[in-house]
Image (cartoon, rainbow, N blue to C red):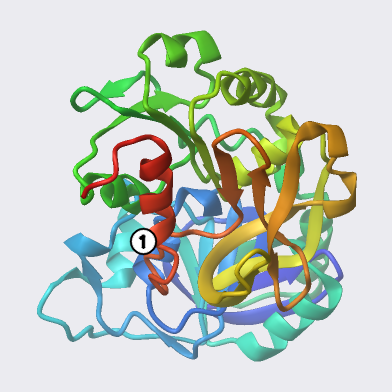
Amino acid sequence: MEAALALEDGSVFVGEPFGADTDVAAEVVFNTGITGYQEVVTDPSYRGQMVVMTHPQIGNYGVADSGDESVRPWVSALIVRELAEQPHHWEARARLEDFLRNFQVPGLQGIDTRALVRRLRESGTQRGVLRRGGSAGFAPSDLHELREAARAAPSVSQLDLVTGVSAVLPVVTSEGEIAVVDCGAKWNILRSLERRGVRPRVYPWNASASEILSSQPRGILISNGPGDPAKLPTVVDELRTLVSSGTPVLGICLGHQLLGLAAGATTNRLPYGHHGGNHPVRDLASGRVTITTQNHEFQVVADTIPESSGFEVSQINLNDNSVEGLRHRELPVFSVQYHPEGCPGPQDSQPLFDEFLGLSELAQP
């Protein structure tokens, strides 16, 4: 049996299906990680996207309990050059294909992923449709229909993606010294706090500033999440109140973009996003360079940050000079575009959690 991926530019890639027997229409992005595929597919920030892995063989070590970043896979589909059928690792609880099938996530293998990634890199992120064919494969009319369906597929800017990945009600795990606004938080962000002796109080994405501040948190973390930050104007409005309260605030990924909007800046879309664990970032104050894990399609536009906002660019990406960090000149508020928790990827930026907890007076001695 065959399956085909059609892009909105008319390109078609025919290969072998795996995972769930279902069709999907979504944006197509690529991830440059060699390992960490389980963390990738369970990252809520990938909701609404098909992910192409650039490494040629995926699934070698199966799926383990320690690799989940959420309760389920969130990718719309997974596209690989070759899927390992028999994983070898002592922690593996299942094959990657079975894991995806159990959650109705389709996949495609046996295509030239290098050619597909080159097209996405040169033409930018594209909408696509993945569909299984019949026993006779795909007729020319079938491929024409696929191309038209790809052109009609929605972009993430048209979709409400955060609602489905956020907590529904506040989750109180203890005294909750740190409030986490859950726009699709990865579990390892919460674990990074817990490893430092701090248990978070998790709020849904649409929690009001008054509700959050009423618990008198020592700090507020705005999490990562999927989609276009411009789709969340109510969060931006509440975030302005949180910033002005004087409570320490840390924004991560989508949270960073929302903080930029709250400061009065604008956001726009990168040509093909940043997805992987090899992005070099320079801190402008210290000159230090760290290698970071990233997963985002949008950026804060540097020259739109109002001088009167009090915010300034604190870090930049050395590949394309995009904004990687914001910091308020007077208030204890800062943000990063990348993922300091890593998982998958480097742990170079873990000290940012210590800085945040230091501002919150919760740092361990």
Give residue 347's quadrant in the image. bottom left
Instruction: Give the residue number, with chain letter if any, for mark 1.
Output: 100
Q: At label 1, which amino acid type do we have? A: Leu
Please give the name of the residue rendered at 81% of the width and 69% of the height, measured from the top-left corner. Answer: 124
- Residue located farthest toward the left when viewing the structure as drawn: 90
Asked whether residue 108 appears in the rendered view, the answer is yes
Is 19 situated above or below 151?
A: below
Camera-nearest residue between 190 and 5: 190
Considering only vertical position in the picture, is 99 above or below 310? below
Element assignment for label 1: helix
At 54% from the left and 23% from the top, the residue drawn is 246
- 247 relative to 5 in the view: left or right: left
The residue under the point 56% across, 60% down is 338
Q: Is residue 207 above or below residue 310?
A: above
Q: Nearer the viewer, residue 340 or 146?
A: 340
Q: Tell me residue 220's x, y (percent).
A: 45, 31
- Name the quadrant containing residue 217: top left
Q: Residues within 10 Å of mark 1 (few under 14, many from 20)?
A: many
Residue 300: x, y in percent?
A: 76, 50
Residue at (51%, 80%) from the top-left corner?
80
Task: Name above or below for residue 249 compared with residue 356.
Answer: above
In the displayed image of the protein, which residue is found farthest to the right? 303
What count of labels does the image hold?
1
Residue 105 screen position, x and y as percent? 44, 57
Q: Is residue 180 visible?
A: no
Q: Position of residue 310 (x, y in %)?
A: 75, 36
